[in-house]
Amino acid sequence: MTATSTNNPSPGIEPDGPDLPAETRSRSAARAGALAMLPLLAGYCPFALVIGATVAAHGDRLAGWAGSWLIYGGSAHLATLRTLDDAGPVIAILTGLLINARLVIYSASLARRWPAQPRWFRVAAAGLIIDPTWALAERHGEHCTDLAAQRRYFVAAGLTLGAGWSATIAIGALAGGHVAWLDLDIVVPLCLLALVGAGLRNRGARTVIVVAAAAAVLTADWPAGSGLLIAVAAGAVTGLICDRRDSS
Amino acid sequence: MTWFVVLAVGLGSFVFRLGPLLVLHRRPLNDTGDRLVRHAGAAAITALIVLSTKHSATGGQVIPTVLAIAVAIVLAARQASMVRLVLCGGSIYACSAIALTVLSR
């Protein structure tokens, strides 16, 4: 995510106006969080339908649907269910965990934004950390320094995503094979592209994206999502090298 | 069995989410670690894009997938919204898939 100017905050992100009473500021932060998540949620709905259709095809619909809150990550959820059918439970668990290993990065990133947040919030918010909530929290944190507003913004965004996500997966699971003809798999990369799109305009971030993409292509056939970790490492190291080159 | 797998992945994922928030609260990252984490986030999403694109293309729709992703990359670079990306990319995918089906007859 690239930094945006303080004078030109991103849509749906309200700066912490010092003139507003604290309660009003927090309420507006919650509203801003929910509103900022809505367009992302609309984009993710077809992705959730894909998962719902997979849940329906899998058999145990309730357990498959429960992953919408328990796993709370579309790629890991989808890969876990597909691998469970194809390769058994051990490989399915390994695959899901490897794909969600990137959450360590998001969490570490948010830890540096939330050093002064209370422990209860960090424990509660941990369950809502995923690509879009991380992206929104990072952008919001660049403009808002009010801790209560940050909390309300993040929780509202996370719950909005979770409620819509879970409901859409349920619809997909109930519709079952009726949505299979739509061939919705393409929406998964389209949704994710929107999250890194801003980085394509920045030279350093663009290099990270290109290197990570190349590494992911080369390791795409590696077992259980291990190639994903190689791609993450390659992109992160490349980013550091670019930063050092730019600063020297 | 599905419950066990979903619970195991969910629990592991929660540990991934919570661990850094608790550990790095006491010992913040230095500047290098901070930048490493930032780049790794973008790299993780990029890798997921590649893997999901490959999955979409393996259904036999290689050309529609490539066209849709190419257009979506241009739109993403122009900071188009996710809804617009999905609508434009999805439309191009659908149109090219239909065109290829018609041409192959």
Image: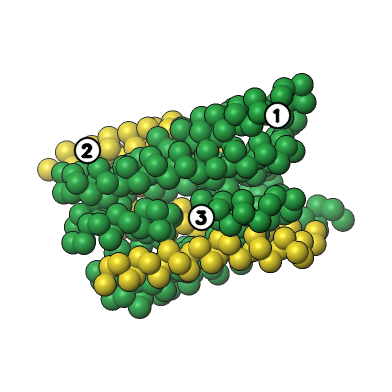
Between tags 2 and 1, which lies in front? Answer: 1
Taking the spot 42% from the left edge, 45% from the top edge, the residue there is A162
Q: Are marks 2 and 1 in contact (CB under 8 Å)?
A: no
Residue B34 occupies which quadrant of the picture? bottom right
SS at badge 1: helix
Identify the residue under disc 1: A22
The chain containing the residue under callout 2 comes to B
| Image x and y of residue A47, in percent | 35, 46
Taking the spot 60% from the left edge, 27% from the top edge, the residue there is A28
Taking the spot 45% from the left edge, 38% from the top edge, the residue there is A160
Residues at marks 3 and 2, CA–CA distance in whole angstroms: 41 Å
| Image x and y of residue A240, in percent | 73, 60
Return the mark for residue B39.
Answer: none
The chain containing the residue under callout 1 comes to A
Between tags 3 and 2, which lies in front? Answer: 3
Q: Are marks 1 and 3 in contact (CB under 8 Å)?
A: no
| Image x and y of residue B104, in percent | 17, 45
Q: Residues within 10 Å of mark 3 (few under 14, many from 20)?
A: many
Q: Tag 3: residue type?
A: Gly
Residues at marks 2 and 1, CA–CA distance in whole angstroms: 55 Å
SS at badge 2: helix
Identify the residue under disc 2: B98
Q: Tag 1: residue type?
A: Ala
Residue B69 occupies which quadrant of the picture? top left
Q: Earlier in the sequence, mark 1 or mark 3?
A: 1
Q: Are marks 3 and 2 in contact (CB under 8 Å)?
A: no
Which color was chain A given? green
Identify the residue under disc 3: A127
Chain drawn in yellow: B
Residues at marks 1 and 3, CA–CA distance in whole angstroms: 26 Å
Q: Quadrant of the N terminus of chain A?
A: top right
